[in-house]
């Protein structure tokens, strides 16, 4: 299912003579959950299960991507830096520039054991793996 299918408010509907609206540059977070993620080789890498926001400054930090498993069993979750994802408006999905085998070996977690996403060593590990830079240092406790 893609963001247009979950658009209960008509955010992305284009009507003749009314070509304005927030998308695709600004999009509702709820409409993005469940969107598929592919790589440039057109391999399905999973779907977005959650979007993690830094509530202290309103920035999007990560998309939590599910990969593998069957009917939610054995599913592995990955926090992918938001900056590593690109919206493919033609296919209504996201693209992550990573090989499928590399994602299988990426740092992930179980749905019942989430990492401390504010831990600086975890932040460095994730951004290093995906070749991205944190938008800022996470808050220090």
Image (tube, rainbow, N blue to C red):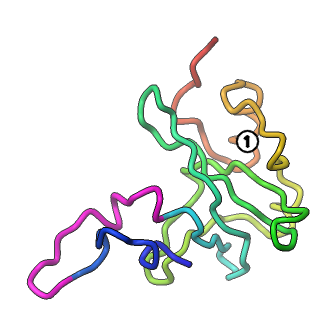
Residue at image location 69% in from the left, 33% down from the top: 117
* Whether residue 129 is visible: yes
Q: Is residue 49 magenta?
A: no
Residue at image location 49% in from the left, 78% down from the top: 92
Q: Is residue 141 toward the left or the right of residue 107 in the image?
A: left
74 or 125: nearer the eye?
74
- For the record, the magenta segment spans 15-31
Q: Is residue 55 toward the left or the right of residue 107 in the image?
A: left
Residue 82 lies, in percent from the top left, at 56, 50
Residue at image location 65% in from the left, 59% down from the top: 49
Give the total number of marks visible in the rendering. Answer: 1
Q: Is residue 19 toward the left or the right of residue 131 in the image?
A: left
**Farthest-out residue, left:** 17
Question: Label 1's element?
Answer: helix
What residue sits right under mark 1 in the picture?
Answer: 126
Residue 94 lies, in percent from the top left, at 56, 69
Q: Tell me the chief SS of the magenta region.
A: loop
Residue 19 lies, in percent from the top left, at 16, 77
Residue at image location 86% in from the left, 73% down from the top: 70
93 or 84: nearer the eye?
93
The quadrant in which the C terminus is found is: top right
- Compared with residue 9, is residue 51 higher up or lower down, i.e. above or below? above
- Compared with residue 5, is residue 63 higher up or lower down, i.e. above or below? above
* Whether residue 107 is visible: no
73 or 141: nearer the eye?
73
Q: Is residue 16 toward the left or the right of residue 14 in the image?
A: left
**Farthest-out residue, top:** 141
């Amino acid at each position: 299912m893609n963001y247009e299918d979950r658009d209960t408010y008509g955010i992305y509907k284009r009507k003749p003579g009314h070509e304005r609206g927030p998308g695709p540059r600004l999009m509702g977070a709820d409409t993005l959950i469940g969107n598929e993620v592919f790589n440039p080789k057109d391999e399905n890498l999973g779907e977005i299960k959650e979007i993690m926001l830094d509530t202290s400054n309103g920035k999007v930090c990560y998309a939590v991507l599910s990969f593998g498993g069957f009917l939610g069993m054995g599913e592995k979750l990955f926090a992918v830096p938001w900056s590593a994802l690109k919206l493919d408006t033609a296919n209504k999905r996201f693209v992550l520039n990573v090989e499928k085998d590399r994602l299988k070996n990426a740092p992930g977690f179980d749905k019942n054991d989430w990492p401390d996403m504010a831990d600086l060593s975890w932040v460095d590990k994730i951004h290093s793996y995906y070749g991205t830079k944190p938008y800022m240092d996470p808050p220090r406790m």
